[in-house]
Structure formats: C-alpha cells, structure tokens
Image (spheres, helix red, strand yellow):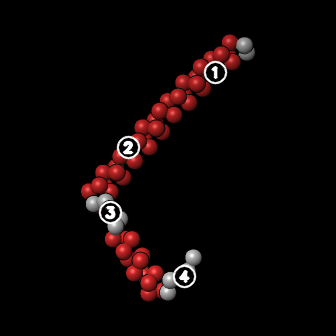
Amino acid sequence: MAKANPLQFMQQVRSEVSKVAWPTRREVGLTTVMVFAMAALTAAFFSLTDILIRTGLTQVLNMFH
C-alpha cells in the first residue's frame, strides 16, 4: 500500500471526520443520565441480592451451629 504524504493524509482525515454523525449536547446529556441511572439500578439490584443471599446463608448455617 502506498503511503500518502502528510498533506494528503490530513485532507483524508478531514474528509472522514466530516462524515461522522456527532451527537448533540442534549443527546450526550440524556445518554449520560441514563448510564448513571442504569448503573444505580444495577448496584441496587446486586446489593439487595447480596443481602438476601447472605441472610439466607447465615440462617442456614446458624441452624447447624
């Protein structure tokens, strides 16, 4: 593959970057909020699951103690 000179390379880069569909500020903000909300819901789910498993296991082990 032939190497392009730096000027051609920069022109090609500029051409490709212009084809990118950049998100709006509002889209970025909404996506960020959704990511944090889903992370919080996931953390709450796994915390609750951990508490339930730990409580059940503790009670089972206390029956044999």
Residue type (three-letter) at the residue carrying disc 2: Ala
Determine the residue located farthest toward the right in the rendered image. 65
Q: CA distance from mark 1 to mark 4?
A: 65 Å
Give the number of the mark in front: 2 or 3.
3
Residue at the image point whose x is 38% and y is 43% from the top: 37
Residue pointed to by mark 1: 57
Q: CA distance from mark 4 to mark 3?
A: 29 Å
* Whether label 1 touches label 3, CB < 8 Å: no
Give the number of the mark in front: 4 or 3.
4
Residue pointed to by mark 2: 37
Which label's residue is closer to the chain start, 2 or 3?
3
* Whether label 1 touches label 2, CB < 8 Å: no
Residue type (three-letter) at the residue carrying disc 4: Lys
| SS state under label 2 | helix
Which label's residue is closer to the chain start, 1 or 3?
3
Q: Nearer the viewer, residue 40 or 35?
A: 35
Which label's residue is closer to the chain start, 4 or 2?
4
In this rendering, position of residue 29 left or right of residue 9: left
Q: Determine whether 37 is above or below 20 in the image.
A: above
Q: Nearer the viewer, residue 3 or 37?
A: 3
Residue pointed to by mark 3: 22
Dot 3 alpha-carbon crowd within 10 angstroms: few under 14, some 14 to 19, many 20 or more: few
Residue pointed to by mark 4: 3
Which label's residue is closer to the chain start, 1 or 2?
2
